[in-house]
Amino acid sequence: MPPAIDHRLLPAVVFVFLATTASVVVPATYAADRPVDYARQIKPLLSDRCYACHGPDSGKRQADLRLDVRKIAVESVIKPGDADGSYLVERIAAEDPADRMPPAQSNKPPLTKEEIELVRRWINEGAKFDEHWAYVPPKRPPVPEVKDTAWPKNGIDRFVAAGQQAQGLSPSPEADRRTLIRRLSLDLLGLPPAPEEADAFAADSAADAYDKLVERLLASPHFGERMAVYWLDVARYADTGGYHSDNHRDVWLYRDFVIRAFNENEPFDQFITEQLAGDLLPGATRWQRIASGYNRLLQTTEEGGAQPKEYQAKYDADRVRNTSAAFLGATMACAECHNHKFDPYTMRDFYSFAAFFADIQEKSVGRQDQTRLPTPEQEAQLAKLDSEIAAVRKGLDAQTPELDAAQARWEQSLQQRRIEWAVLKPADAKSSGGAVLEVLEDGTIAVKGPTPEKDVYTVTFVDTTAGVTGLRLEAIPEASLANQGPGRAANGNFVLNEVELSIDGKKVPLTNATATHSQEGYAVAGAIDGKPETGWAILPKTGNASHAVFETASDLEAGRTLVLTLRHDYGSAHTLGRFRLSATTAVRPVHAEGADSLPQELTAALAIAPDQRNPQQKDALAAYYRSIAPELAGVRKQLADLEAKKQAVLDGAPTSLVSISTSPRTVRILPRGNWLNDSGDVVAPAIPAFLGKLDTADRRPTRLDLARWMTGRENPLLARVFVNRLWKLFFGQGIVKTADDFGTQGSLPSHPELLDWLAVEWIESGWDVKHMVRLMVTSATYRQSSQPGKELRQRDPGNVWLARQGRFRLAAEFVRDNALAISGLLSPKIGGPSVKPYQPAGYWFHLNFPKREYVHDHGEDQYRRGLYTYWQRTFLHPSLLAFDASSREECTAERARSNTPLQSLVLLNDPTYVEAARVFAARILRESGPNEPERIAYAFRRALGRRPQPAEQEILSRLYHKHYEQYARDEAAVKELLAVGEAAVPEGARPAELAAWTSVARTILNLHETITRY
């Protein structure tokens, strides 16, 4: 085994124990000499301590008292201007616990003396009620004047400086250039800068060097990937369905849309509109249809026996939860079973919001239908093929005396014909699954012996008759089979997935499949469509004889060896138990008994004398005859070839889940959220009533109307919510800490005027995302050092006043990307299907129905960025899970950010990181100087963008020598280490030396600093 790593250089795994309190924290910007702000100081207190019993929820309201409505409050417990005479103050300040509010049984702490005094001041000032700050549309506040006019670089800095000034704080110095380029690169791309880039920036003394760097990074295609990671959490993107067996589905095109939108700087209002209602836009483009897949990213079930009505209720609720949390920062989910206890969302609001999505075509239970979305190149191919097909079809419409005479003879033969069948006796019959196929005297094949889950029967016939036009497959009942068969499954059924015919080793197409009976969803045509997932089955008519007939594409010649292959791929022993094959030379079309292959209108036309038929009947008969006429066989083959090419292009087109609008379902309020209770009112689509009403006259509002309101100036939430989340990406925490809750239970903004200024700035910029990113990262606030002095750490430990930059661990995907980039393994490829990196064996052991085996990818796909990792909701890749990636079962606006020993073990032992360290070690040996100090210095520059400290140099030097000595004596350990991963070991490498430098590289990749953004 490899020797132990020196733990002095392992990551600083910090265990932080935070003592929290339930009391509401009011920003210190509100000085005692300023009027009390109801929305920001009083309402949060009342919401936290009082609203559960005296708030919006009528079902839980006590004493018929509401403290969220001024009229009711002042009529009963508040006397504006007279705190001493107000019953509210008497009760919250009562010394006797039996009289004090909130009561002990509420599990809410009593108000502190400071909070009681705040309430008293508010009442004495007139008990003014204002609407909750987040529900009032933002207005651009004036940029404050500050004492230090040299420090601010834009409006952001003036707001921040004003807050610091009020607290007696000063900003930290600007970070050094190497820290700045690493910070910017990790923030904007999720990737570290190359040492050459860091050197060039550090040496560039031009005044606009920093701005040029920002522009270069914003123009990188990796910017879209970085931003997509955050958005995919919000939209709950995953590659699987989540519920029950968590099966695969194709939605990676949606991820490509997100990356593309951020890279192209698509206006954010358009970005939102296309996701909510891209399919409803006039002349919707391919990308807009893909974007509408947002509405389909929820968890769905394929569980047999699941209740469709129950799961439709789940889907409706999911869409309300996600859309309200993602776009509004709202906890509307709390109003599914009762009115919200703290915010003005009602149950009617909840279900009216759900009604917006009632037009989406989907299955309540079962595999969702994928939509084919050809690429532009494939669309061009299809257009060309359609043109060629149209030209060939004209040949089928040709009218000549010869064809007219042939048609007349065909019509006459139909009046006289009777299909005769001759049993074919097999020369050989075999089972690939080990069953025994016994050929009986009458040509019947009885299947005996082992019962494999799946099977392929191969039946051979010799010296065939000339002119065979069709084959009949009889499925014959058998008393020894369950339900008398004719299948071997426990219910007597079978699924024949494919029937294939070959003559002397050459495949012969089969056409025009008909059957005496087909099970719903398992039509006999599925047995010859080349798709293993379709097939012929016969439920509920087990225990009865059934047969299927297949026409041959051309008449078969005599004296040939015919091989018929019957594929049973369904599983659970759905294989034929007794069957027989026959052939006919009858005039085409041939068909199963009772399954006339001629459409009813043609049969009716044939019953009329030729000179009595109307033009439509004549044209229909002529068109049909030309589809089977031997004289046009060449033209039909040409047409079939072109259609096969077209189908091949379509089969190769990517698929995704998209929104398809259909007639809206009825949506009603579900009392207590109970899907079995239909007594609730039917509701129409509507936004929450307290936020206004859509102006659609008498027309039913649509998702497009919702999108237009969502991005309109009258919506007070969207712009605030998203600038806050952008702020969190670049500063470590939002101006509002609760990124997914802007309601009364959420945190108050630390800089409310700055938040509103940013929101209005964004709207007035045309919802320009890159403009806002640029504004934030070019601010002096962003460029500060993240190293706090002792005094600053004591006075502002949470960095509320932004007197320094934040420092935080990279997101899970970027931890992986960082290691691969440092090693040189990272693939720069943008977009495409999800990939499967190395994963511990057996991790998917309990992933069943069906049981699946994880097979990791090879080559370039093994080294793709983390956001392309296959997202299995119930079994998220363990490396991502260790670093707090979201399962994406729900909207995640803010990931947890933990520091645990498990993360260190992942970096030390996950094959991805061991291989990255090995390739990094080879790079150190290849690209650095010949001596040890130069190699360690090179490794630090590439991984951290700086030179090592003397102590670090000494520790790594000792580590290298210790491991080199051990590896030199342990050839097996060297082989084991160098065999990790698929990347080749460089030719000529000295194994013990490479292994020892791999230990050094593993240590550097494991440093707290390596996975932390400063």
Image (cartoon, rainbow, N blue to C red):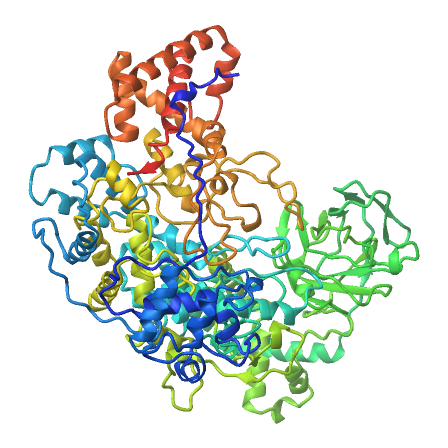
Query: Is residue 209 positioned above or below 372 on the image?
Result: above
In the current view of this chain or complex, which residue is farthest to the bottom?
Answer: 612
User: Which residue: 26% across, 22% down?
Assistant: 948
Instruction: Measuring from the top left, give residue 812's x and y in whole percent.
Output: 42, 42
Instruction: Measuring from the top left, give residue 54's x and y in whole percent.
Output: 50, 74
Instruction: Measuring from the top left, give residue 119's x and y in whole percent.
Output: 36, 69
Q: Is residue 932 visible?
A: yes
User: Which residue: 41% across, 49% down?
Assistant: 832
Q: Quadrant of the C terminus?
A: top left
Q: Is residue 716 visible?
A: no
Is 58 placed left or right of 983 in the picture?
A: right
Q: Which of 422 and 38 lies nearest the eye of the viewer?
A: 38
In the current view of this chain or complex, which residue is farthest to the right?
Answer: 479
Instruction: Measuring from the top left, give residue 706's x and y in whole percent.
Output: 39, 76
Q: Which of 636 and 223 lies nearest the eye of the viewer?
A: 223
Task: Report how many numbered discs are placed on residues in the image.
Answer: 0
Query: Is residue 863 positioned above or below 707 on the image?
Result: above
Q: Quadrant of residue 542?
A: bottom right
